[in-house]
Amino acid sequence: MKPILALIDFSDTTPGLLETAAELATGLGRDMVVLHVADPASADEPGDDSAIADEEPGVAEGRELRVGRRKLRIIELELKRRGLRATTLLVPPAGTRQSPAGLIVEQIGRLTPGFVVVGSHEHGRLYQMLVGGVAQEVLRGSRCPVVIVPAVMSNTGTGTVS
């Protein structure tokens, strides 16, 4: 059976998104894959081995990958503790060659999930018109059903998958 693919970014929407994906995986008897595309720009988030502002890009990228792997491992263990068959996947950034959304759509094609679960962030109409969003690009590029978890629902999470 095709897995449920949960796309996360470690933001405030992640706990609710993971809960929704876990409920879907449990209800359908599917495996779950949690995917995160690393972003070297987020390596300087507080509490995550903070990067120095003028640190070499390669060093910041390496730190982001280590932090991402550690967070994903915790998520995987929590999901397995709940009895889910779960794996995690960290996709390194592609630099300027491809957007994170492009990398995600590429992984969707490779993994061929039954469903994709993605969170939406609260951005204004102007931002959406000018920049768009990952959820929007995933919706356009995916060849399978996409479940979008609204930011309002996602923010009710506790920070862990329970």
Image (cartoon, rainbow, N blue to C red):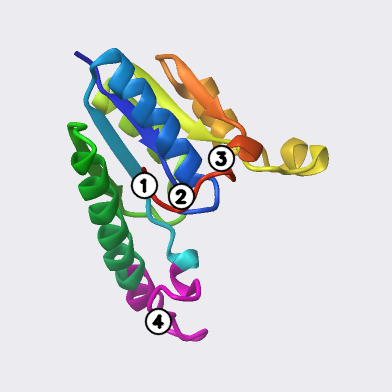
The residue tagged with tag 3: helix, strand or loop? helix
What amino acid does circle 1 point to?
His
| Residue 9: numbered disc | 2
Mark 1 neighbour density, 10 Å: few (under 14) some (14–19) many (20 or more): many
Q: Earlier in the sequence, mark 3 or mark 1?
A: 1
Residue linked to disc 4: 56
Quarter of the image with the C terminus in it: top left
139 to the left or right of 58 = right
Q: Are marks 1 and 4 in contact (CB under 8 Å)?
A: no
Question: In this rendering, which labeled residue sits more in front, label 1 or label 4?
Answer: 1
Identified at 38% across, 19% down, the residue is 115
Please name whichever residue, 99 or 123, is drawn nearer the observer in this view of the structure. Answer: 123
In three-dimensional space, the C-alpha distance between marks 1 and 2, rounded to whole angstroms, equals: 6 Å
Q: Are marks 1 and 2 in contact (CB under 8 Å)?
A: yes
Mark 4 neighbour density, 10 Å: few (under 14) some (14–19) many (20 or more): few
What amino acid does circle 4 point to?
Glu
Question: Is residue 55 shown in magenta?
Answer: yes
Q: Are marks 2 and 3 in contact (CB under 8 Å)?
A: no
Identified at 41% across, 75% down, the residue is 57
The residue tagged with tag 4: helix, strand or loop? loop
Residue linked to disc 1: 36
What amino acid does circle 3 point to?
Ser
Residue linked to disc 3: 154
- Report the magenta residues as a range: 43-61
The residue tagged with tag 2: helix, strand or loop? loop
Quarter of the image with the N terminus in it: top left
Give coordinates of residue 108: x percent, y percent. 34, 27
